[in-house]
Image: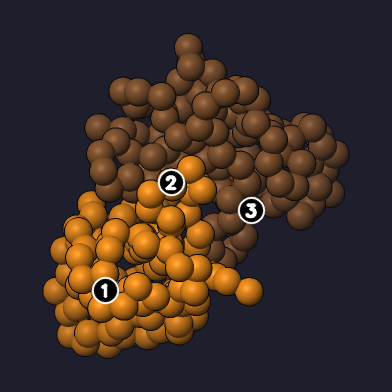
Chain colours: A orange, B brown
Amino acid sequence: DGGITQSPKYLFRKEGQNVTLSCEQNLNHDAMYWYRQDPGQGLRLIYYSQIVNDFQKGDIAEGYSVSREKKESFPLTVTSAQKNPTAFYLCASSIERRTNYGYTFGSGTRLTVV
Amino acid sequence: AQSVTQPDIHITVSEGASLELRCNYSYGATPYLFWYVQSPGQGLQLLLKYFSGDTLVQGIKGFEAEFKRSQSSFNLRKPSVHWSDAAEYFCAVVASGSARQLTFGSGTQLTVLP
């Protein structure tokens, strides 16, 4: 079955450490997105990519970095510059030219600073 | 800028009762509107979407929503709630511009009493 796989499901980060969250899709979708979810704040866009080797900052990109070397993969790195990284991170994808299909979401990664 | 407002942070209903979750949007043109549902610790699942045409749209799990342009609203309804409907619900609108990222509301948490 096609879908989006996020790993790991739970991740713990020490102060000053970079961590990378994985997002892989086999839907042949062009566009991919990273959202951060905090209680009571809904989803906030971190980065998005409409095509391989290209990506744009969203509303809260500071302290995060991404790459899009393959159509299927869009990893997110949470750097030490992100001062409050504890949150639930969601990856999504869409057929960019046909946004009427909406987004397909992964099951999320919960990141905790220890 | 486009925005989505979900006025109710938390709603409690009894099983078998009817449900209406409110969503208001601010958008310069006819928007694409979506409702998603999220179970605890999971990703988001698309319930239904509106682009044009009939203003009453049917979705999965017995949900429906009505687009009212005059009120800038897209409220979600269900005639009879089941205990399994307890979850968080998000309204979303497609932002303008070529990037077409979804803008999400802050969510409404639904509790269902036995």
* Amino acid on which disc 1 is placed: Arg
In whole angstroms, how far apart are the C-alphas of marks 3 and 1? 32 Å
| Mark pair 3, 2: CA separation | 25 Å
Q: Amino acid at mark 3?
A: Ala
Q: Earlier in the sequence, mark 1 or mark 2?
A: 1
Residue for badge 1 = A68
Q: Is residue A61 left or right of residue B112?
A: left
Q: For residue A73, which quarter of the picture?
A: bottom left
- The residue shown at (25%, 39%) is B97
Q: Which residue is mark 2?
A: A99
Residue A4 percent across, percent down from the top left = 50, 71
Q: Residue at x 75, y 47 (%)?
A: B61
Marked residue chain, label 3:
B
Discs 1, 2: same chain: yes
Residues at marks 1 and 2 touching, judged by CB atoms closer than 8 Å: no
Select label 3 or label 1 by which is in front.
Answer: 1
B88 left or right of A113 in image: right
Question: Which residue: 82% across, 43% down?
Answer: B15
The kind of secondary structure element at disc 1 is loop
Q: Which residue is mark 3?
A: B87
Q: Nearer the viewer, mark 3 or mark 2?
A: 2
Mark 2 Cα shell of 10 Å, populated few (<14), some (14-19), many (≥20): some
Is residue A90 something one can see in this rendering?
Answer: no
Q: In screen coordinates, is A41 left or right of B90? A: left
